[in-house]
Amino acid sequence: MAKKSKKAAQRRRAKRIWSTLYIIVVVILLGLIAAMLISDPSSMPDINLRATATPSPTPTAEPTAVPTETPVPTAEPTATPEPTPEPTPLGQQEIDVASLSEDVLPGRDGIEVNYKIYANGEQVDSYTREHPIAIADGANYSKLDGVTTFRGNNFRSTGSWGVIPAEAGSMAIKYSFKIGGIDEWTGVGWTGQPAIVRWDAETLRNMNINEAKKDKDGLVEVIYATLDGKIYFFDLEDGERTREPIRIGAPIKGSVTIDPRGYPLLYVGQGIDTVDGESVRIGMRIFSLIDQSELLFINGHDKFATRGWFASDCAPIVDAASDTVIWSGENGLLYTIRLNTAYDAAAGTLSIDPVIDRYWYESEVTTRPGMENSVAVYNHYAFFADNSGLITCLDLNTMTPVWAFDAGDDTDASLVLEEREDGNVYLYTGSELDLTANDKGRGTVYMRCLNAMTGKEVWNLAVKADESSDTGGSFATPALGTGSVDHLIFFTIARARDAEGERYNGLYALDKKTGAIVWTISTGGFAWSSPTLTFDENGRAYLFQNNSNGDLKMIDALTGEKLDNIDLGSNVEGSPAIYNDMMVVGTRGAKIYGITIK
């Protein structure tokens, strides 16, 4: 019974296997047929299956299409624009020494310049300024309204502030007063420009100004150093004294500097070291204008000096940010003075604690070291010329020369700087006739433009001149054209010769880019006084030029047309300063004039 059951189970298992195999074969064949129909229905073979028919499958419903959102096109990435480089702030360009050609680099194939650095009285091998100098452009040099130093700013590019009346055409003397002299030195000498400043009310209260003037609303004070050894203070409007003069006791030939921060500090050099045949101390001085006390005296008889002439006709430049004064001397040294100023306007107290560094130099060009011109400064570069004609660009933050240029002869007139729209910085300079004069006192002087960032000459204009050292050539600092005369630079040349060889004292308007003469007029007598440019309310440009005959000319700066002339009675060596419609200038005839421009 067990065996029968076992066999029956085996038969049932075999039947199930064969049934399963049969179904698999049918499914495979149906799949092949379906594949052939899809690919090519005409290729369907004749197949006759001997199998039990199966019902046709219920058709599967086509799935309902689910709508999809229209894809949002991927935005093309917007290219990130290259950032526009920030323009270099005015007055802040750097000289790329690596790009300079070898013929302008001291100590290479150019002029051999040997130098020493004395930091706080000790010679050092290298120098890095603890408080770096970085003076802004000339337009932002001073916080005070007015003219605070010789030719107005660190570029030495202006002697005026404000504007004169529209369509001005005449001048009139409003007041004058007599001053004195020492020995043969009388009145106002070269460079002899006054400072004219409007003080803020708080500082005005702190100073020892006469009470009547201290209470005057909007007082504008004139400060004038003279050859009679005094520094005068008076009201621009009426010429009345605002306080007692400071008495140096020896002739002052240069121009004063007032601190451009509005601090009551006055800086002045001294030109002559003898009085009545006796030697007197000579040097540079800083005064407090709170009480007129002397805060610092730098002896021109400096133990580090390279020349036995100890005067200083230079008006210094003050860097507000680093609290540093830049001051050159005729003893062959350039000084930087970290003042460590403490001014408490509320308390009315002022003090300085100076630290003095010195730049000493010699060169193959320099037979007479020492500088009479007032140093010009761009960023942390100082530009000055010596009595042999060596023009130096000095990095003030390392106290090392960057480039040097041989002007060919003594250069007393201050160098003038300009930053133009083309991104370059230019330097304008004129030489005098001295070392290069021939036996008859004749020779050639030059008006020049240099690239201040490279030391390369852009152009020069040569002029024949007479009278070596004392009178011939360029003693006047050029006037930089701006505004309606932006294309011009104005030079004054004494004792020149015209194309026919006749003596000619000339005021030249030159094209800044080429040096070509645009116009020239005679100054009459020879002129050391610097031409001074100002503008009227409509932007018309005017030049004012003094000469040795006492003439003061008013000139249309664009055309050279003479508009007016007044006689100041004697030689004018000093340079005028202008505040709005008032001009102040002194003469060797020992008079100071206040002149209205109408």
Image: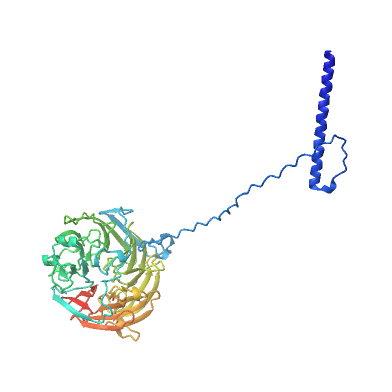
Quick check: can you spot residue 457? yes
Q: Position of residue 409 (x, y in %)?
A: 32, 72
Q: Is residue 137 above or below residue 533?
A: above
Q: Is residue 482 above or below residue 82?
A: below
Q: Position of residue 133 (x, y in %)?
A: 31, 58
Q: Position of residue 26 (x, y in %)?
A: 82, 36
Answer left or right for 2 relative to 255: right
Residue 250 quadrant: bottom left
Residue 18 quadrant: top right
Q: Position of residue 53 (x, y in %)?
A: 84, 36
Quick check: can you spot residue 279? no
Decide which of 573, 245 is in the foreground and name it.
245
Q: Quadrant of the C terminus?
A: bottom left
Residue 88 quadrant: bottom left
- Count up the numbered dots: 0
Residue found at x 23% / y 83%:
565
The colour scheme is: rainbow
Q: Quadrant of the N terminus?
A: top right
Residue found at x 86% / y 44%:
45
Decide which of 554, 581 is in the foreground and name it.
581
Decide which of 105, 554 is in the foreground and name it.
554
